[in-house]
Amino acid sequence: MSRRARGLLFLPIAGAALAGLIAACTGLPDAGSGASAYGHFAASQMVDKRGTTDVVSAVTFDLRAFDTLGEEFILFAAAAACALVLRVLAGRDVDARREQHAPAIAFAGMHALAAWLVAPTIVLAAYITSHGHITPGGGFQGGVIAATASLLVFAAGHGAIARSVAALEVTEALGAGAFALLGVGGLVFATAAFANFLGPGTPGDLLSGGTIPLLNVAVGIEVAAAFTLIFVELLEQALVRDAG
Amino acid sequence: MSGLPYLVAAWLLVAGVYGMVTSRHLVHLIVCLTVAQSSTYVLLLAVGYRAGAAAPVFKSQPTSTPVVDPIVQTLTLTDVVVEATVAALLLALTVQVKKRFGTVDPDKLAAMRD
């Protein structure tokens, strides 16, 4: 099908879809009046019942913990699939080149700046992950920040991180496994899978929220390893191309 | 104000799909897909938004404070993670497409298959 024919076919369909969506929007409650009964329950009960002051985390890692397990495994599978798709016939001769590899675009002081930023980034990631049940944040956000530290290491001119692909895969699996084990813990120590089997503690304390901070840390490790793995696999492609 | 966020969501979805249909580069196509996906964030957050309400975090406010719906924010978090993984996987596939076929123009790829 030519581009022109496709465009002509698309326009009426898109117009009809847009009209349908707008018509559907008129049936929705006014924006600004939101809040469901479920949301109201979570907002009013979770602080007392679970000791978490961040209700979004409480819903993600307590009420919807089982769904979050599925989300975890989506990430796990996607990172594994990325590695599988990109793991090329390049052979291991790339190993030697990786270590000397420096990014093509570099400016004066970039290596030093990137190296200097690594430690603060990791501290920020640890803070965001460990305080996810108190203030906005959590394992997903903290994990992604931690993964950017690996990009900084790379920008600092150290390609050696790409050698630790196997370690990254193991770390990722450990994070996902820890999450699943905490779910089984609910089955063993309480009534159901992912039941919060630890006491709520005092809302606002670092050690509160029962299993929620533990699940946050497990997710943080898994997300950090998964995204680092994806970054490394994609960066490796640039190296293979350079090695040509 | 009443319906504007919904219209923005609808517009983002259609604009993203338009970009995908007319795309000449697979990376451009993936970016358009993320634009279309981001309409769901706007829709979810608009559904849960309450005028004048605070964020659902009670670290420094009493639990009786009216807050926006935390459930849709949780769903948005899930949505963001899934979008990121989908984009990463598609980019990885794009790298392999470029290697195997030497082009990332969807039209040329379709022509090669015939």
Image (cartoon, coloured by chain):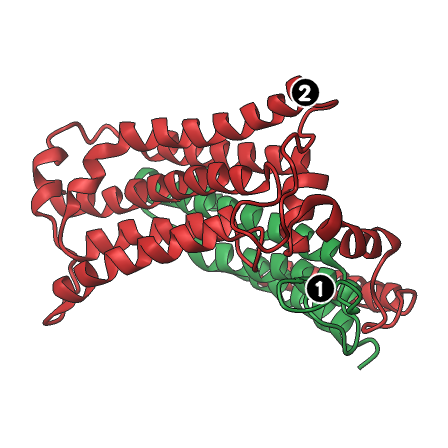
Chain colours: A red, B green
Instruction: Give me the disc on residue A170.
Output: none
Residue to which mark 1 is pinned: B45
Q: Secondary structure at mark 1?
A: helix
Q: Is residue A200 left or right of residue A240?
A: right
- Residue farthest bottom in this picture: B1
Rendering coords of residue A31 (x, y %): 82, 72
Pick whichever, A230 or A169, lies toward us: A169
Q: Secondary structure at mark 2?
A: helix
Q: Residues within 10 Å of mark 2 (few under 14, many from 20)?
A: some
Pick whichever, B66 or A238, lies toward us: B66
Pick whichever, B51 or B11, lies toward us: B51
Image quadrant for the C terminus of chain A? top left
Residue to which mark 2 is pinned: A187
As drawn, A64 above or below A109: above
Q: Is residue A19 visible?
A: yes
As drawn, A177 above or below B74: above
Q: Is residue A123 left or right of residue A42?
A: left
Rendering coords of residue A126 (x, y %): 39, 50
- Residue shown at 61% from the left, 21% from the top: A184
Q: Are marks 1 and 2 in contact (CB under 8 Å)?
A: no
Rendering coords of residue A90 (x, y %): 20, 31
Pick whichever, A97 or A5, lies toward us: A97
Q: Residues within 10 Å of mark 1 (few under 14, many from 20)?
A: many
Q: Quadrant of residue A91?
A: top left
Numbered disc 2: what chain?
A
As drawn, A18 above or below A237: below
As drawn, A150 above or below B8: above
Q: Amino acid at mark 2?
A: Leu
Q: Quadrant of residue B89?
A: top left
Rendering coords of residue A92 (x, y %): 15, 28
